[in-house]
Image (spheres, rainbow, N blue to C red):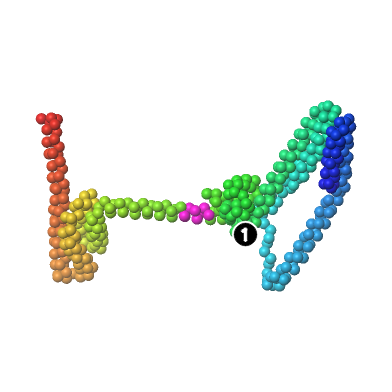
Amino acid sequence: MDRNEWYRAGEDIRDQVQQAVDTGNFTNLGKNISNTVNETINRTMQEVNRTVGTVGESVNRAVNDVGNGIGRTMETVSENISPYASNPLYKRPNARLDKSLFQRTPRGSVSGVLCMGAGYGVMGISALALIGSVGELIAYQKSLVPVIISGIFTAAGLWLGVHGSRLAGRVKRYKRYVGMVKDKLYCSIQELAQRTGKSERFIVKDLRKMIHLGMFKQAHLDQKQTCLIASDEMYDQYMLTQKNYEAEQKKLEMDKLAEERRRQEKERLGGAAEVIEEGKSYVRLIRQCNDEIPGEEMSDKLDRLELLVTRIFDQVEKEPELASELRKMLSFYLPTTKKLLEAYRDLDSQKLDLSNIEQTKREIETAVDNINEAFEKFLDELFREKAWDIQSDISALHTILKQDGYLS
């Protein structure tokens, strides 16, 4: 039925109400309005019955005609613009959606349209009935029940129509989302929001609902909900990349903290930092020579030497002011020790049983003993001075306690 039929019915009812108001005669108002509504409904139902009988056949013919037309058009376009169209090996890309990823007929495609049609149809008819019932109530003081019933049907129709509109709107948005994500299988929420005119918060909520309904069969949102990922395989790749990224960030953070600690330690040590680093390089050299020299006797001497040098420089780390006393050691003892150990290593690697080589090795072993003795005395002096300092502190404390009367 033509929509104008409803408009004409509404105009008739309006004119009848206006005439009753102008003349003050409401005698037949309710009856006239009721007749107008009933006639409109009857004509609507007749039109619907006639339409239902032919709509299926018409739709099928229209679909076939459109499909054939599109097919012919695409063939013509392909022949005109595609350099590969004449190639028998060329295959047209599959434009159909991957059904393992997307619903081809998403939920709400049919129900949304039906709800809209039924809901708004019921609302229109019920609204007219409501107007008639109100008119009869005013004119004849009839029962309020028809008004209530028609009002309920009007509200229910409105709700059903709005619900259908929401379903249809969601289907429309789903198709737009799919169009943006189907090729790359991922798309940023920001891009989706920009191209749909919705807020990012709305897009995230909308996608989560669609994923819950199964419209996207494998889709995921990333951890920060900034990207839509349409397949499980790509999401697994994303998770692996994210895991590697987080591990790399953690490593960079740990390196940064370690560098910061080294900087703070260097500031604390001041000029002693250079002395300590040089001393550690000698410790590494002693350990390396010890590994390369097989003799057990010499190895014991080098173990002792490494222990002494390590303890000396450990003490300097605790008391950076001792660094000045190590200058002589760094300028003479340690460089000399380095030369002796490297010479011993080279002689030992010759694997020759010659008297002059053995004599030189024994002399170097004796020199290492002397160096160990010197380092022992140096370390002893360091702790002796510290012991003296501690003894002085104890004596001062004893004197103060005695002066204050806490000791007799």
Residue span colored magenta: 238-245
Q: Is residue 28 left or right of residue 326?
A: right
Residue hosting label 1: 183
Q: Is residue 84 visible?
A: yes
Q: Nearer the viewer, residue 7 or 3?
A: 7
In percent of the image, x 65 and y 46: which residue is there? 213
Is 239 magenta? The answer is: yes
Q: Nearer the viewer, residue 367 or 26?
A: 26
> Looking at the image, is 32 positioned above or below residue 201?
above
Q: Main secondary structure of the magenta part?
A: helix
Specify few, some or many for label 1: CA neighbours under 10 Å numbering under 14, 14-19, or 20 or more: few
Is 97 magenta? The answer is: no
Q: Is residue 89 left or right of residue 224?
A: right
Give how far across and how far down residue 94 sits, in percent: 68, 62
In percent of the image, x 23 and y 55: which residue is there? 272
* Rendered-image quadrant of the C terminus: top left
Residue lying farthest to the front in this orientation: 22
Give how far across and how far down residue 387 sits, in percent: 15, 45
Amino acid at pointer 1 = Asp
Q: Nearer the viewer, residue 241 or 48?
A: 48
In percent of the image, x 68 and y 60: which residue is there? 95
Give how far across and how far down residue 38 sits, in percent: 87, 38
Give how far across and how far down residue 166 sits, in percent: 69, 45
> Looking at the image, is 189 positioned above or below residue 397?
below
In percent of the image, x 60 and y 59: which residue is there? 184
